[in-house]
């Protein structure tokens, strides 16, 4: 047993050194702490200096703050002062190893200071050179321009026809009067050419409307249901920088991202009773759910047909996709809505264009090795999801 403990103690620092300190911070600390501003607890930047660079003391305090203060250790007086300063808010004991805590502390020390753009927050203007136009907006703009050009062409044709009739009348010695012009305009508008053009425009417009209607069936982009509790993602994910994985714990482990239980909400709201936007009213609903044991009936925003199989872990953990690639900038949304179309064409197009990182360890190592060899030999160009069978029907329809 002693040998096993010794092996574990030797291996633990190596294992933890490979951990992502930022991910550990977001998953365990960000709900109560920010790097550069006070939250439930103090800002963490500069924590090493405030603890006189006594890392072991800081690690012991993070493990169990209450036991640390009782033990009368080197920085117990400072810890007690913090406890009083922050309204005697108890920091829960952390189930992290020493190496994991040190990884978090290394992240805090190495994290870059906020820039002016970051400090501006979600409401800041978009950087110059970026565009918020999506494909459909571009299509509507181009369609409007084409319609205007067609209208001006028709006006030009009418003017040319009137001018031609006027020249012929002048050659016959007839006088150019408004009656003559009116008669020629009516005659032109009743001509087979104009009738054909009008029919084509009407049929084109009707066909376009029918096309858009058929392609929008069962698609709900922009869908924003009313939720039982006014929950602001802009406040939680944007202002307080709470990571998506802290609430949606299944996103890296299972098919579903999972909706957070009330227990997760109460990790913060057992202390925080009033919000910056909705006051105490909405948080009171969370507490009521916790006290009564009745779950909050959140309304699902992103829905796929029953015949579609989609696995969050496959995309987030294996492929390394960011949540925003499908869900948009949730940290800027007051109320979450369906950002993407989530249509079959939208998914297929992503699989055709998304390149694979063949140097990433983990899944499909032998396949990746074979593809790297083919690339080195010049047999294939870029490797997309399509090359790995991402367009096979059975991948999504089973």
Image (tube, rainbow, N blue to C red):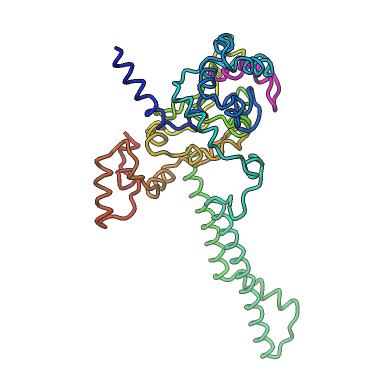
Residue 129 placement: quadrant: bottom right
* Residue 351 picture location, percent across and down: 38, 45
* Count of numbered circles on the image: 0
Q: Is residue 277 magenta?
A: yes
Placement of 9 over or under 214, stated as above or below: above
Residue 17 picture quarter: top left
Q: In the image shown, does 220 or 194 lie closer to the viewer?
A: 220
143 or 374, which is in the foreground?
374
Q: Residue at x 53, y 30 (%)?
A: 243
Which quarter shows the N terminus?
top left
Name the one closer to the observer, 272 or 44. 44
Question: In the image, residue 104 lies at what x, y percent?
Answer: 50, 29
Q: Is residue 21 above or below residue 377?
A: above
In the rendered structure, which segment of residues is drawn in magenta?
264-286
Left or right relative to 170: residue 247: left
Is residue 248 found inside the magenta-colored segment of the image?
Answer: no
Look at the image and tell me in which quarter the C terminus lies.
top left
At 50% from the left and 24% from the top, the residue drawn is: 259
Identified at 37% across, 34% down, the residue is: 314
């Amino acid at each position: 047993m002693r040998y096993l403990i010794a092996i574990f103690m030797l291996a633990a620092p190596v294992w933890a050194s490979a951990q992502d300190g930022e991910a550990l911070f977001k998953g365990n600390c960000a709900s109560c702490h920010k790097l550069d501003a006070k939250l439930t607890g103090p800002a963490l930047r500069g924590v090493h200096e405030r603890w006189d660079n006594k890392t072991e003391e800081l690690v012991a305090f993070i493990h169990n703050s209450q036991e640390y203060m009782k033990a009368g250790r080197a920085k117990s007086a400072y810890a007690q002062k913090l406890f009083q300063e922050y309204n005697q808010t108890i920091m829960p004991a952390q189930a992290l190893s020493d190496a994991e805590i040190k990884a978090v502390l290394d992240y805090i020390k190495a994290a870059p200071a906020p820039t002016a753009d970051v400090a501006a927050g979600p409401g800041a203007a978009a950087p110059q050179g970026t565009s918020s136009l999506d494909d459909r907006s571009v299509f509507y703009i181009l369609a409007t321009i084409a319609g205007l050009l067609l209208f001006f062409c028709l006006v030009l044709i009418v003017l040319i026809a009137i001018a031609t009739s006027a020249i012929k009348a002048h050659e016959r010695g007839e006088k150019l009067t408004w009656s003559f012009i009116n008669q020629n305009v009516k005659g032109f508008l009743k001509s087979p050419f104009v009738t054909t053009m009008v029919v084509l425009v009407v049929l084109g417009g009707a066909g376009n409307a029918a096309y858009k209607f058929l392609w929008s069936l069962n698609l709900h982009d922009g869908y924003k249901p009313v939720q039982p509790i006014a929950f602001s993602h802009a406040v939680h994910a944007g202002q307080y920088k709470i990571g998506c994985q802290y609430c949606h714990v299944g996103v890296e482990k299972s098919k579903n991202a999972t909706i957070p239980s009330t227990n997760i909400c109460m990790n913060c709201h057992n202390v925080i009773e009033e919000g910056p936007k909705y006051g105490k009213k909405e948080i009171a609903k969370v507490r009521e759910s916790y006290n009564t044991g009745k779950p909050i009936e959140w309304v699902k925003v992103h829905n796929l047909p029953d015949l579609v199989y989609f696995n969050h872990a496959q995309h987030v953990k294996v492929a390394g996709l960011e949540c925003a690639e499908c869900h948009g900038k949730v940290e800027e949304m007051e109320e979450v809505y369906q950002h993407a179309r989530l249509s079959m064409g939208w998914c297929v197009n992503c699989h055709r264009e998304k390149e694979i990182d063949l140097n990433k360890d983990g899944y499909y190592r032998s396949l990746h090795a074979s593809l790297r060899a083919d690339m080195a030999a010049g047999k294939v160009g870029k490797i997309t999801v399509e090359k790995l069978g991402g367009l096979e029907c059975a991948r999504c329809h089973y």
